[in-house]
Image (cartoon, rainbow, N blue to C red):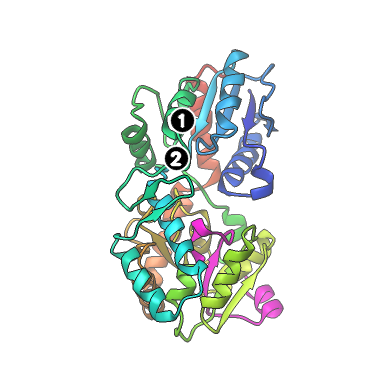
Amino acid sequence: MKVLMVNTPSATRFRGGDLTQMRKSAEALRRRGVEVVESFDVEPDGRGFDVAHVFNLRTIQSTPRQVRHLKDQGIPVALSPIYLNPSFALWGTRVVKSIFRGERTDDEIERLLLKLSGRTAMIRTSGGAVLSATAENRPRGHYDRIQRATLDGVDYLMPNSILEMNALVRTLGRFDLPFTVVPYAADPATFLDPDPEPFVRRFGLRDFVLQAGRIEASKNQVLLAWALRGLDVPLVLIGGNMQNRYEQWCRQHGPKHLHIIDHLSSDTLAAAYGAARVHVLPSWIETCGLSTMEAALADCSVVASTAGYEIEYFRDLAYYCDPSDHASIRTAVERSLDHYDRDQERRLDLKRLILSEYTWDRAADLMLRCYGRMGGN
């Protein structure tokens, strides 16, 4: 079988979870004898391939054109939508940026954050739209319509969770496409019980609170940094940064023991997970939380967000927080720190769950089954 895997032209620059999913799945498929070729072209050449597998419905600046071009060539198209209704995240990220953008006293920030956590804050965009916690907020006009039209060219869906598929059906109204849940995964060869010492020797840090991921508004580091002010445990943020001003807000408003480290290699990141006590990802946009899964394999206690679909992955084996509520974030982190020793069996259960259900080999087997249903050889 010959499969063309397609992602947005900016994927290699952003290095997000969609690229990780594509490349790790491709590696596992190749171990099964499948020929896999990558394309980041806006008009990918699907000639000679049995199936085209496109990633990320949210990148509407390129995905619709890619799907349409492949269908025009007569290639069966599978889509991993990585779908999330953008309403809550768009509201939350815009409100948080408006709070920390100006010169405000701590009391003023706290007052505004109470409106955020109470979900009464509203903000007007440059185009005049008013965003609120309960509105159907969209980044641009006809956003849903563009996504629905893209699905017209798709033969098979591979959502990462039942919750994701449910959100897609409810928001976009498409319930006629066949689908199979193909979950995200983590690499135990890299992240299972790593040696923390390479990170400790290099950075001099151990037993800290960690967040791994691009430093940007959607990952919500500034609210995490604010929430942990006064906590006598180092906070370490690891990730590339394309929003310099946002990183400055983290430094300005975060705890005194804040450390920001640029993107690390997988092996060094694994050592960082091993050196940490808690990994927290109070994100607005996670469909599963890849870094949370990696951290759990490394024996971190994990705090996940209620905004995405993480609860389907981590069930009752993680702590959860509301990304709009800094008090909720702090409480979840404090509980995970306080209960770390007695949670040993709980962390072990989460490792077992990941190793049994969330591996790239299992994801590849599910993909192969889907390709076969689409007529791939």
Q: Position of residue 33 (x, y in %)?
A: 66, 30
The answer to whether any part of residue 377 appears in the image is no
The front one of 332 and 326 is 326
The front one of 375 and 321 is 321
Q: What residue range appears in magenta?
A: 195-221
Mark drawn on residue 41: none
Disc 1 is placed on an element classified as helix
Mark 1 Cα shell of 10 Å, populated few (<14), some (14-19), many (≥20): many
In the depicted structure, whether residue 163 falls above or below residue 202: above
Residue 192 lies in quadrant = bottom right
The answer to whether any part of residue 127 appears in the image is yes
Q: Is 262 left or right of 150, judged from the image as shown?
A: right
In the depicted structure, whether residue 228 falls above or below residue 370: below
Mark 2 Cα shell of 10 Å, populated few (<14), some (14-19), many (≥20): many
Q: Which residue is drawn at 53% across and 37% down?
A: 56
Q: Are marks 2 and 1 in contact (CB under 8 Å)?
A: yes
**Residue 220 located within the stretch drawn in magenta:** yes
The residue that label 2 is drawn on is: 83
